[in-house]
Each structure stands twice: as C-alpha cells, then as structure tokens.
Image: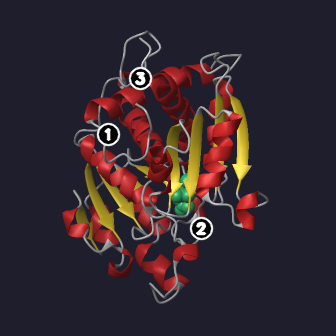
Amino acid sequence: MRHLLSTRDLSRDEAIAILDVAEDMAEVADREVRKLPALRGKTVVNLFFEDSTRTRISFEAASKRLSADVINFSAKGSSVSKGESLKDTAQTLAAIGADAVVIRHHSSGAPLVLAESGWIDAAVVNAGDGTHEHPTQALLDAFTMRRRMHGKAARGRALDGVTVTIVGDILHSRVARSNVWLLATLGASVTLVAPATLLPIGIGEWPVAVSYDLDAALAAGPDVVMMLRIQSERMHAAFFPNAREYSRQWGLDDERLATLGADSIVMHPGPMNRGLEISSRAADSAKSTVLEQVANGVSVRMAVLYLVLYGTHQGGETVVTDERTVS
Ligand code: NCD
C-alpha cells in the first residue's frame, strides 16, 4: 500500500489485512515497553490544516510507538497563515526528508493532490479531507466492531451480517462516507438515519438503506448505533429548526438508550456535543465504545503507517504489495 487516501478503493482482503496488522500492534500496547523499532530512522510529518485533538495525537502516539521521528505541523502559527500554498509546504517537507505525510485538510481531495503531485515522494495518509473521507477513523471503527462482535477470534474476519445504524449529520461527515464504503466491503448492512436536509444528494447510489425515523431504525435492533457530531462549523444555513428539536428527533437520549439490545454498542468518533446528538448517560454507558475507539485508533494508525512505509506483515508475509514492498 503506497498511500491511504480513502476506504472506497480498499479491497476486502486489504481491509482485513490492515485490521489484522492492527491486532498485532495492539499487543504492543499491553507490553511493559510499548515500543517497536519498526520505523526507526523514518520521518513522519503530521500536517494539520484543520483542528483536531484525537486524530493528531493518535497519529503522533502511533508514530512514536513505532520509533519514527515525528514532526507536528499545524497550519495555525505556520506560514500557511501567510498564504503559503500546499505546493510550497509539500516541497519544504520533501526537503526536510519526510517519509510519510499525514494530512488533514479542509478541502476534499487535498491528500490525493499531494499524493499525485510529484512535489514530494512520501507516503500520504488522509487524516480527514473536507467532507470527503477519513479512512483511519473508519478502520478503527471497524476494528472496534470486529473486536466487540468476535472477541479473541477476530483475526482474519470481516463484519458479515453485522447491522450498523449511522445517525446524524451525514451530509458533512467524512466519517460517515469512509464508514459506508468500508462497512459495505466488509459485508455489514448499513442504515443511515438523518433529517432529509442532512443527507447528501446522490445518497440513492450509496450501498445503504435510508430512514428518517430514528425510533423505527432502533426498533429494528441494530448491533451498532453510531452517532455523528452536528458539524456546525460546516453549516452556513439552517438545516434543522433548533438544537432542542434536533435532539428530540435525532438524538440518542436516555429513553432511546434504554431500548437498545443487550449486546448492542454505541459509537461516536468524537468530539461529542453532549446533550445534542448524544446524552451524557449514553456517552458514558457500558455500551459506549468512545474511549475504546480512541485506544484502538493508535493500533490502527500504527498498522497503517507501517504498511504504507513497508507494505509487509510483521511475520514477513506480504499483505499489501507495491513498489515499497519488503518481504
Ligand atoms: C471527526 C472528524 O474530524 O472528521 N473527528 C475525528 O476525527 N475523530 C468527526 C467530527 O469532527 O465530527
């Protein structure tokens, strides 16, 4: 795997292989010394043009656990605020000798531009681009579901037959898009629930069912309920009457939480608007995997960085091939 730009172009085998390498990486987190020498001598740059808490520190932790040198670059406080272009920034990183660039950008497609530009010969990992994709988030979500559903027997498995209901601001959500493609590839059934104003045009072509009625969707007994943040910063119009109305109709409140099946789980990529799309009780309940998702994110990002930089399984078995492959 040369780059990770989206989940849409991952095959089922590739996706399972990434999750399996992440399982290997998760074992490192349980050791006394949580470090592997795998990326010693490699330089990973975190290039963040948009705000982030979890994703940025997660990539930083992942790089450090693999012994890479990490450079954190955030657009605020850099020359980007003086109008420096992506090209100049990329060429500067190339001159520094970056081997991998983890990029978050407000423009959909920026990671693809960087990967195909020729400005820099580094592996590119998309950490969220506009409303387009956020592949490592979807992979860590799938990893979390797979562990919850299959426990210790998760390795090698997909998510066939798992039912996932994704609720909320689908229109602005790169997390929803990456999840939809990956979950379809892994055999899960996805239902999207949102007000019509927060569903994108063209939704009919996505491999999902659509519902406007959260209570009806929950009554179907999904294995996973994934709540999405209302992305006010991307809204330049009124998409729903007001916050109270939204949470009454589309929020996972305490009453709805009580109707969920015994083995079902509640997911949220964070950051959460407590009291809007999710109640505090739901966020903190035993069903919630919010912090598990964060912890798993480090293992998944270790796997992704390792695979884009070396493309091999730890045991020497090649899982994803390309010109960087070392078997
Ligand atoms: C998401 C993002 O930035 O796309 N957060 C994350 O990466 N954990 C979702 C969001 O901002 O709502």
Residue wearing tag 2:
273
Residue ID for mark 1: 10
Query: Is 162 positioned to the left or the right of 246 in the image?
Result: left
Amino acid type at image mark 3 = Lys
Query: In front: mark 3 or mark 1?
Result: 1
SS for callout 1: loop
Q: Is residue 24 left or right of residue 284?
A: left
Which label's residue is closer to the chain start, 3 or 1?
A: 1
Q: Name the spot of residue 194 as percent of width and height, x first.
A: 36, 72
Choose top left, top right, bottom left or bottom right for residue 66: top right
Query: x%, y% of residue 279?
Result: 55, 66
Relative depth, front residue between 64 and 152: 64
User: Of callouts 3 and 2, which one flags the residue occurring earlier in the amino acid sequence?
Assistant: 3
- Give the mark nearest the N terminus, 2 or 1: 1
**Amino acid on which the number 2 mark rests in the picture:** Asn
The Cα–Cα distance between marks 3 and 1, rounded to whole angstroms, is 24 Å
In the picture, the disc for residue 157 is: none
Badge 2 marks a residue whose secondary structure is loop
- Residue type at mark 1 is Leu
**Tag 3–tag 2 contact (CB < 8 Å):** no
Tell whether 326 sits left or right of 284.
Answer: left
